[in-house]
Image: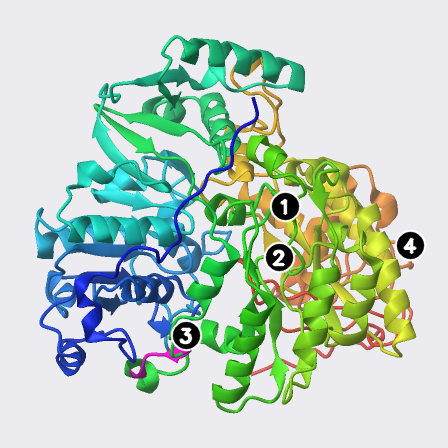
Amino acid sequence: MPASRASAPHLFERRPYWAKRFGVAPFLPTSREEMDALGWDSCDVIIVTGDAYVDHVSFGAAVIGRVLERAGFRVGILDQPDWRSAEGFMRLGVPNLFWGVTGGNMDSLVNHYTSDRKRRSDDAYTAGGGSGSRPDRAVIVYSQRCREVGGPEVPVIIGGIEASLRRIAHYDYWSNAVRRSVLVDSKADVLFYGNAERAIVDFAHGLGERRGLDAMRGLRGTAFVQKAGTLPQGWAELDSSEVDGGEQGELVQLRRKARRKVLEHPRARTAIRLPSFEQVREDPVLYAHASRVLHQEANPHNGRVLVQGHGDREVWINPPPVPLSTEEMDAVYELPYQRRPHPRHDDAGKVPAYEMIKTSVMLMRGCFGGCSFCSITEHEGRIIQSRSPDSVLREIEQIRDTVPGFTGVISDLGGPTANMWRLGCKSPTIEAACRRPSCVYPGICENLNTDHSDLIALYRKARALPGVKKILVASGLRYDLAVESPEYVRELARHHVGGYLKIAPEHVAEGPLSKMMKPGVGTYERFKTLFDRYSKQAGKRQYLIPYFIAAHPGTTDEDMLELALWLKQNGFKPDQVQAFLPSPMATASAMYHSGRNPLKKVSRADSAERVAVPRSAKVRRLHKAFLRYHDPDNWPMLRAALQRMGRADLIGNGEEHLVPSYQPKGTGHGRGRGPKRGRAKGATKPKPGTALTQHTGLPPRETGEGRRRPGLGSKAKSKARSGRKPSRKRRG
């Protein structure tokens, strides 16, 4: 019998809490003085965030705060409090109902450190852009301070992307170890994961009605800690090995067996027991297995409870939240945001992340792409939650009328993916039963609607608004979907590209692409053909800017060489490149840690597919060097690698070679070593106009955790200059 779709009452269906009589705050208060101006003696909820407070729908703390305000609660914001003492957490007093803790729009460790574990010098979510305004592992630190100030009587809940992606035992790249669930380490009462509006409104109303925490432990999209061995009465427990499978036939057999076991308890609900924290910490294969099962249970319409032991306690993870309807999405996005940073930050300088998105519009949430290195699906879900066209157009008009200095250009009309608005499964019944991690890999599912006509119509309405000169699409584009609708590519190329369109093939070799769950390079070529054709028809010179990942699990040196040769053949010379960063809970991170492929059955070591993992710093540097094959500083490393790989034929001074056989003075390993600088021994001086090229950089990537800035190389724009003899004059 097919699974039934999960449903839920409207987000704002409940009668508002009594404090609604205080009305709407211009900004949610951040100080006692602001509370006094609103006539508040206390806050019902205080949200603690690692970001500067920006009252905008792109900032999670503002969204949750405004949603709770709409439900009738008095909400205060403690943004970037001084965590070094409890004093910084007493600015608004103690909340009546609960503390809400988030690390911010980014995981605090991703915010602080690069993929090479080097400290970042900037923070886009801080006024002025400087780093150091939040602690490492902000959720844990903030939670402990809240408990210190409020005592055990005031519940502490955690949420946002940092908590969401650390809800089970997880591999932590920065400590190179498997850590416990952040719920255990923070000692919080409840963890909210994913888009938590519905759950947090129900939770706040429950506390307002003086119901205890135990009465609300069934909320979807939440996790809590309980004593081990306290499975509720009427529940059946399944071991994770009984629901995991490999090939489809074996998977069906295992699920039938599991279903028969559950039927022994006619009224039972089902909890799946994952390997414990202690087991996954010691056994990488079990870690990969737990990751696989967690992703199999990610569909809100059929996902089941997951239980994972941590010593004498268990983390109980309820099924994912029910996606918001279009009506609910409109209601959330049209709450009375001020759409700018709080005035308290004016003297500190601009908030870079806000400057980047202040004239952009979000169409939707979620992603059904399932890329193994990305955490969007784990956090927002794979079912697309779309706004209505009218709501989107109203926001564009609001930007036009209220944003100071608006030039008539909407910088982005998109979302996590630019072209998934209103796309989804054709059949609600199939969607409710599906457990595929991706709707587009290894090929586009026959049940997926790929019609872009609604999106084309929205683009046309948006650019027809008075006072709007240009609508740009800057979000990442899913090109394998776009080629299914050539008319969409035509519309995009004619009207919505500002010269460059970023796109993410990520690699060209089948090995890493299969581990990334990305389409082959042939699909990219199909899209490029369409894009170039329609750009030419529009009389425009426009370029695709492809992004690539170095050192992804499943990538060999030979794969990176193949990519470097493809880049050279196509005239691409990336400037800043992105090395794979194992973010918590991503499938590729499980590959990185375990050396196994969670996309395949991994319940036993002898059956688990092994994955080559570029883990050492030396190999990661080499893989990045292949992406920047044109940088003279990388040539010594690449020459050595090519000789080791038996590809010395790629070393030379001709167009067919990847790197030249000479070394300019002041570059590479010879830098700063006096007479040893210069060409390699035996190398000939290249002819003018044949070797080194200059590079034109492009603006940095605007979304995602990496800040990659690719460059477009072309013979027309970058002429060789290596024929000049370098000056020996010492520079001051």
Name the side, left or right, on which 389 lies relative to 506.
left
Question: Given contact means CB atoms under 8 Å apart, are the residues at marks 1 and 4 in contact?
Answer: no
Question: Could one spot residue 700 in this view of the protein?
Answer: no
Residue found at x 70% / y 71%: 459
* CA gap, disc 3 and disc 1: 32 Å
* CA gap, disc 3 and disc 2: 26 Å
Disc 4 or disc 2, which is closer to the eye? 2
On the image, numbered disc 3 is attached to which residue? 129
Q: Is residue 342 magenta?
A: yes
Question: Given contact means CB atoms under 8 Å apart, are the residues at marks 3 and 2 in contact?
Answer: no
On the image, numbered disc 4 is attached to which residue? 656
Q: Give residue 536's quadrant in the image.
A: bottom right
Name the side, left or right, on which 33 lies relative to 652.
left
Residue at the far bottom in the pictured view: 405
Quarter of the image that includes the C terminus: bottom right
On the image, numbered disc 1 is attached to which residue? 369
Q: Residues within 10 Å of mark 3 (few under 14, many from 20)?
A: some
Task: Residue 664: give x, y in percent of width and height.
Answer: 74, 66
Residue type (three-letter) at the residue carrying disc 2: Thr
The earlier-in-sequence mark between 3 and 1 is 3
